[in-house]
Amino acid sequence: MDELYYKLGQNIKKLRKELGFTQEKLSESTGLSPNFICLLESGKRKPSLETIYKLSVALNVPMHKLFYFADTTQINEKNKESYDKKLNNLLSNLTINDKLFLNDLIKTLKKYRRDSRKKQKD
């Protein structure tokens, strides 16, 4: 699990640098402290959904892009159960409001992917 937060932090750092933002500039844009940004980028803090949203707005990317890791393993039938367990564990610790927010986010992502595929075919 710590590896996930490390990868997320590295991705945030990469996106921040692509925009030419310092940690201080990202801090100002999100309302998060520079120290928290530093800890987040090093994988030592676990962001809330609200924090992920603030970061996506400040970095001008859709929320799902924060979770795009180039080396992400493809899910297949062998490791599907493992991913299902991990996902269930993550969900079990969320508040009902976070679960509702995540549900809406997933619906939005699915629609975005469907629309993107449709545009590629046209």
Image (cartoon, rainbow, N blue to C red):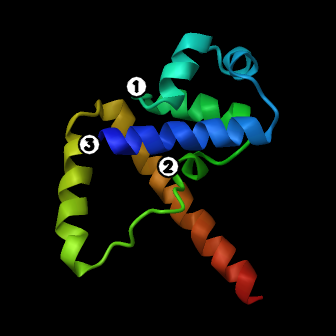
Q: Is residue 24 left or right of residue 75?
A: right
Identity of the residue drawn at 62% across and 64% down? 112
Of mark 1 and mark 3, the one earlier in the sequence is 1
Q: Which residue is mark 1?
A: 44
Q: Residue placed at 55% from the left, 21% from the top?
A: 38
Q: What type is the residue that disc 1 sits on?
A: Lys
Residue 117 x/y as whole percent: 64, 79
Q: Position of residue 107 (x, y in %)?
A: 48, 58
Reading the image, the residue beneath label 2 is 105
Sequence-earlier tag: 2 or 3: 3
Q: Of residues 117 and 103, which is closer to you in this image?
A: 117
| Foreground disc of the pair 2, 3 | 3
| Side (left or right) of 73 relative to 52 | left
In this picture, is 22 found above or below 85?
A: above
The local crowd at label 3, few if under 14, some if 14 to 19, many if 20 or more residues have their Cα within 10 Å, is few
Q: Amino acid at mark 3?
A: Leu
Q: Is residue 101 visible?
A: no
Q: Which residue is mark 3?
A: 90
CA gap, disc 1 and disc 2: 25 Å
Q: Which of the 4 image quarters holds residue 92?
A: top left
In this rendering, the label closer to the viewer, 1 or 2: 1
Image quarter where the N terminus lies is top left
Where is residue 33? Give x, y as percent.
Answer: 59, 10
